[in-house]
Amino acid sequence: MKVITIGIKNETEATREFEEAFEAAQKRLPFKQKTGVYFTNLEAARNFLTPKRLELLHVIKEKNPKSIYELAKFAHRSFPSVFKDMDVLSKHGLVKLTKERESPRRSVHPHVSYDAINLWIGI
């Protein structure tokens, strides 16, 4: 089972990790890149991972729509609202959007490559 992590880190911890990575990059030293999506507070994570966006992720995984338009139809939502949510999810790495060159309309195929989301909250 492939899992993606969404986490909450306080600003101090996020800044420290950024500084460590930046310093390693300046010195050309290897460093372990953190994978996942991180926020500085729970409210920001809630605003990002809305019930409607979670539903879209589920529909993509279950029905494998061939386009965002088809995803909107499966989810019974308007195309503009689904398109906006896909843009946000893809920018944060939760959805991969692939342009289909063979299709007459050059549709964009949404894909989810994980099976679960792990919500990590540091204390």
Image (cartoon, helix red, strand yellow):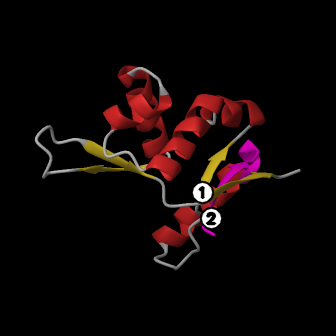
Which residue is denoted by mark 2 in the rendering? 20
Q: Nearer the viewer, residue 48 or 82?
A: 82
Q: Are marks 2 and 1 in contact (CB under 8 Å)?
A: no
Write the residue at 44% across / 34% down: 74
Residue 7 is one of the magenta-drawn residues: yes
Residue annotated with mark 1? 36
Mark 2 secondary-structure assignment: helix
Q: Is residue 2 left or right of residue 25?
A: right
Amino acid carrying label 2: it is Glu
Answer with mark 2 or mark 1, whichever residue precedes in sequence.
2
Q: Give the total number of marks visible in the rendering.
A: 2
Magenta range is 1-13
User: Could you tell me residue 84's position as x and y percent?
Assistant: 42, 28
Q: Of tags 2 and 1, which is closer to the observer?
A: 1
Residue at (61, 34) in percent of width and height: 48
Badge 1 crowding class, 10 Å Cα cut-off, few under 14, some 14 to 19, many 20 or more, is: some
Residue 31: in magenta span = no
How far across and down, in percent of the image, does residue 24 sit? 54, 71
Name the amino acid, label 1.
Gly
Nearest the eye: 81 or 23: 81
Q: Is residue 80 left or right of residue 34?
A: left
**Between 109 and 41, which is closer to the camera in this rendering?**
109
Residue 22 place in picture, x, y as percent: 53, 62
| Residue at 41% from the left image edge and 30% from the top image edge | 72
Spatial CA span between label 2 and label 1: 17 Å
Q: Is residue 95 left or right of residue 120?
A: left
